[in-house]
Amino acid sequence: MDMELSGKRVLVTGSSSGIGAAIAEAFCQEGAKVVVHGRDEAKTQAVVQRLTDAGGDARFVIGELSSEDVCAAVAKQAAECFGGLDILVNNAGGMAAANRPDSTAESFNRPWLETPWDDWRWTYEQNVGSSVRLIQAFAPGMITQGWGRIINISSASATQTEPDLADYQPAKAAITNMTTGLAKSLGGTGVTVNTVTPGTIATEGVRNGFVLWAKQLGWETDDWAEIERRFTSEVIPQPTKHFGRPVDIARMVVFLSSPQASYMTGGNYRVDGGQCRSVN
């Protein structure tokens, strides 16, 4: 299906790897002009090189979005890449514990009562603050041109919480909530706003984490297919019996960004293999 995105100008935050890189690639395959964003210049440039080698039109911007000044600079540079923006994908996220140089898999699950307020602040700035600033930077131009798409990436943990992850889960819940209000605020402008909510997605980092987890559980295997089957049956049960892939999220984002989805706004679209037990 032609998504009618040829020539559309797109910024995908947090697209130097994983889900974000897959989203950037999917847009390039549709003929869009893509700004790839990351914090690591070498990794970000590598994604752009891969996209351009495949015939895509891609540029890159670098910056730490939890900083207000740097976020503003990223917005300015991204707008200059192709002379404006039609589609904004707020994919950058993460949690404070994972951002520390000395972080380990164990430190990600710091107990709720031991999670300092500084962690809450950083995680909220990285997830919600960056999204708000970029929306405020680019939405006026979309309104002026009478067309635009804003896609916010949330998480299954926004609505189906787990123990701890104290700072991360509420930040993602805020992302899901703010989408609905913004969609109403932009009603009649030609700009739609939607949330895409991934479940567990088997990025390289996630796969490595599950292999280590399997060893901690005493599973005597390093075969990914077997590890995935057991986790989705015994630990994180879901109907599909497999985890998602980055391309699964990319396909949904591209569709919601297209003219094909003009009647869809203010929604939360789960791509989670049935992991979430709630209706939505």
Image (tube, rainbow, N blue to C red):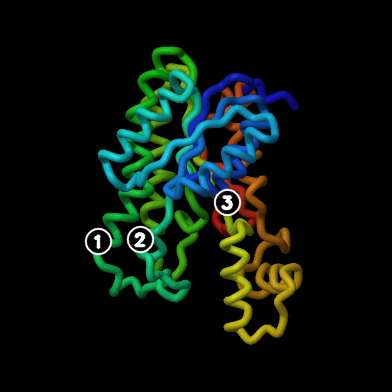
Residue at 29%, 74% in the rendered image = 114
Q: Which residue is mark 3?
A: 18
Residue 260 in sight from this viewpoint: yes
At mark 3, the secondary structure is helix
Classify residue 213 as left or right of residue 131.
right
Q: Which comes before the other along the chain, label 1 or label 3?
A: 3
Asked whether 126 or 241 is in front, the reply is 126
Q: CA distance from mark 1 to mark 3?
A: 26 Å
Label 3 near label 1: C-beta < 8 Å?
Answer: no
Relative to 134, does residue 213 appear above or below in the rendering? below
Query: Between tags 1 and 3, which lies in front?
Result: 3
Residue at 35%, 61% in the rendered image = 96
Identify residue type, mark 1.
Asp
Residue at 61%, 21% in the rendered image = 259
Relative to 112, does residue 221 appear above or below in the rendering? below
Characterize the local packing of mark 3: few (<14), some (14-19) or many (20 or more) Cα atoms within 10 angstroms. some
Asked whether 118 or 55 is in front, the reply is 55
Asked whether 83 or 110 is in front, the reply is 83
Quadrant of residue 108 within the rendered picture: bottom left
Identify residue type, mark 3.
Gly
At mark 1, the secondary structure is helix
Q: Which comes before the other along the chain, label 1 or label 2?
A: 2
Q: Which residue is mark 1?
A: 118
Characterize the local packing of mark 2: few (<14), some (14-19) or many (20 or more) Cα atoms within 10 angstroms. many
Characterize the local packing of mark 1: few (<14), some (14-19) or many (20 or more) Cα atoms within 10 angstroms. few
Measured as percent of width and height from the top left, residue 107 is found at 40, 73
